[in-house]
């Protein structure tokens, strides 16, 4: 027989116990202790995971990718080695480009003839042939005749972009103005990289502008980048608005085709549109508009505008035996 006191103590003891779903009995202090231990365990687990070498590796790789995309735009020596290795591993040689299974190489002239003769390669007939195309593009542009408009290969546009972009440490939020962007051989790369509306261009040639608007921008999926491309030939920049300061203004193979007087008018108008002091003007090929002035006349004239010559640089093409000469200018500090 248990005494009344013993029975009461036993009942009190039972009240402190909570039955688990499987009938295992857990006391309140045990519960508190378990939660505390779990919390301490979790704390150490998370700390050890964040110092784990495998997680560090992932972060480093991402960091490198991030730095790569923001610090450097041109191909690295590792990129080039990787590409050569891929060609080697696949045992690729340049073969004659002739008819073979599933491949029917044709010249631009042949393609143009087909397009004109068959109204494109449309399945729609007669009046309908052009009714289902939102942006019907002239055949000459479709066969990319405009890629041969300039002396240099079209691919050289990428070289120019990489050189200029790395030179000014281009960021997506940078603002860029090209004088004479032609068919966007260079401009396309800037437009793709920059934020919408951050690429501006002044171009005088109507056919080049047609190629840019009717073929290049839509075919490259860049309509959403809304580049501001203005037709004009008198170095008049008012249509680009006021208050914008460019990180980069460049003229690729343009100033050598312009009268010196017009180049100087342009420079005068551009000074206040160039970001002081880190903004840069880059001019390719030569600066005869400058060197044709005698003695130190050019330096004086630049200084009067608030500009100074920084240096001459060259840049090797990635794909063909060629280097481009560039002349760099900035706003003077005094
Ligand atoms: C050799 S192309 C170079 C095009 C482009 N910058 C490139 O590198 O591919 C020269 C371009 O400058 C343009 N240009 C020449 N004089 C100009 C002027 N006064 N104003 C605007 N563009 C001009 C031409 O129409 C042509 O598109």
Image (cartoon, rainbow, N blue to C red):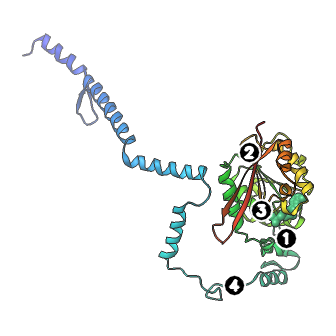
Badge 2 or badge 1: first in the primary sequence = 1
Q: How many numbered marks have been drawn onto this rendered protein structure?
A: 4
Rounded to the nearest angstrom, the CA distance separating label 3 from label 2 is 20 Å
Q: Secondary structure at mark 1?
A: loop
Q: Is residue 74 left or right of residue 302?
A: left
- Which residue: 27% across, 23% down? 28
State the residue position of label 4: 105
Rounded to the nearest angstrom, the CA distance separating label 1 from label 3 is 46 Å
Rounded to the nearest angstrom, the CA distance separating label 4 from label 3 is 35 Å
Q: Residues within 10 Å of mark 3 (few under 14, many from 20)?
A: some
State the residue position of label 1: 131
Rounded to the nearest angstrom, the CA distance separating label 2 from label 1 is 47 Å
Rounded to the nearest angstrom, the CA distance separating label 1 from label 4 is 29 Å
- Tag of residue 69: none
Badge 4 or badge 2: first in the primary sequence = 4
Badge 1 or badge 4: first in the primary sequence = 4
Residue 191 position within the rendered picture, expressed as x and y whole percent measured from the top left: 73, 56
Residue 308 position within the rendered picture, expressed as x and y whole percent measured from the top left: 78, 45
- Which residue: 21% across, 21% down? 14
Please name which of the two marks, 3 or 2, marks the residue nearer to the observer. Answer: 3
For the N terminus, the quadrant is top left
- With respect to residue 14, does 207 lie above or below? below
Q: Given contact means CB atoms under 8 Å apart, are the residues at marks 1 and 3 in contact?
A: no
Residue 249 position within the rendered picture, expressed as x and y whole percent measured from the top left: 78, 51
Q: Given contact means CB atoms under 8 Å apart, are the residues at marks 2 and 1 in contact?
A: no
Q: Nearer the viewer, residue 100 or 88?
A: 88
**Residue reaching furthest left?**
1
State the residue position of label 3: 285
Q: Is mark 3 within 8 Å of ligand 1?
A: no
Q: Secondary structure at mark 3?
A: loop
Badge 3 or badge 2: first in the primary sequence = 2
């Amino acid at each position: 027989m248990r005494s009344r006191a013993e029975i009461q103590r036993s009942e009190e003891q039972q009240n402190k116990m909570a039955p688990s779903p499987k009938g295992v009995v857990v006391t309140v202090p045990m519960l508190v202790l378990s939660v505390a231990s779990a919390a301490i365990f979790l704390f150490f687990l998370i700390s050890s995971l964040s110092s784990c070498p495998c997680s560090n590796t992932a972060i480093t790789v991402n960091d490198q990718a991030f730095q790569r995309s923001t610090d450097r735009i041109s191909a690295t020596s590792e990129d080039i080695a990787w590409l050569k290795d891929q060609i080697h591993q696949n045992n690729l040689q340049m073969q004659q480009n002739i008819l073979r299974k599933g491949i029917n190489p044709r010249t631009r002239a042949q393609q143009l003839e087909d397009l004109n003769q068959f109204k494109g390669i449309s399945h729609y007939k007669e009046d309908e042939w052009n009714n289902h195309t939102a942006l019907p593009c002239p055949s000459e542009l479709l066969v990319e005749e405009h890629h041969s408009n300039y002396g240099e290969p079209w691919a050289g546009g990428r070289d120019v972009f990489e050189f200029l972009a790395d030179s000014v440490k281009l960021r997506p939020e940078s603002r860029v103005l090209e004088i004479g962007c032609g068919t966007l051989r260079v401009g396309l790369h800037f437009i793709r990289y920059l934020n919408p509306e951050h690429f501006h261009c002044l171009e005088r040639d109507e056919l080049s502008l047609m190629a840019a608007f009717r073929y290049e921008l839509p075919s490259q999926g860049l309509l959403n980048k809304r580049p501001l491309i203005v037709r004009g030939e008198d170095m008049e920049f008012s249509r680009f608005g006021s208050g914008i300061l460019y990180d980069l203004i460049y003229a690729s193979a343009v100033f050598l085709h312009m009268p010196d007087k017009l180049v100087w008018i342009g420079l005068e108008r551009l000074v206040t549109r160039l970001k002081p002091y880190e903004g840069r003007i880059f001019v390719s090929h030569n600066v005869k508009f400058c060197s044709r002035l005698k003695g130190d006349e050019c330096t004086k004239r630049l200084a009067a505008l608030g500009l100074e010559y920084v240096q001459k640089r060259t840049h090797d093409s990635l794909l063909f035996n060629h280097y481009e000469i560039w002349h760099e200018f900035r706003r003077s500090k005094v």
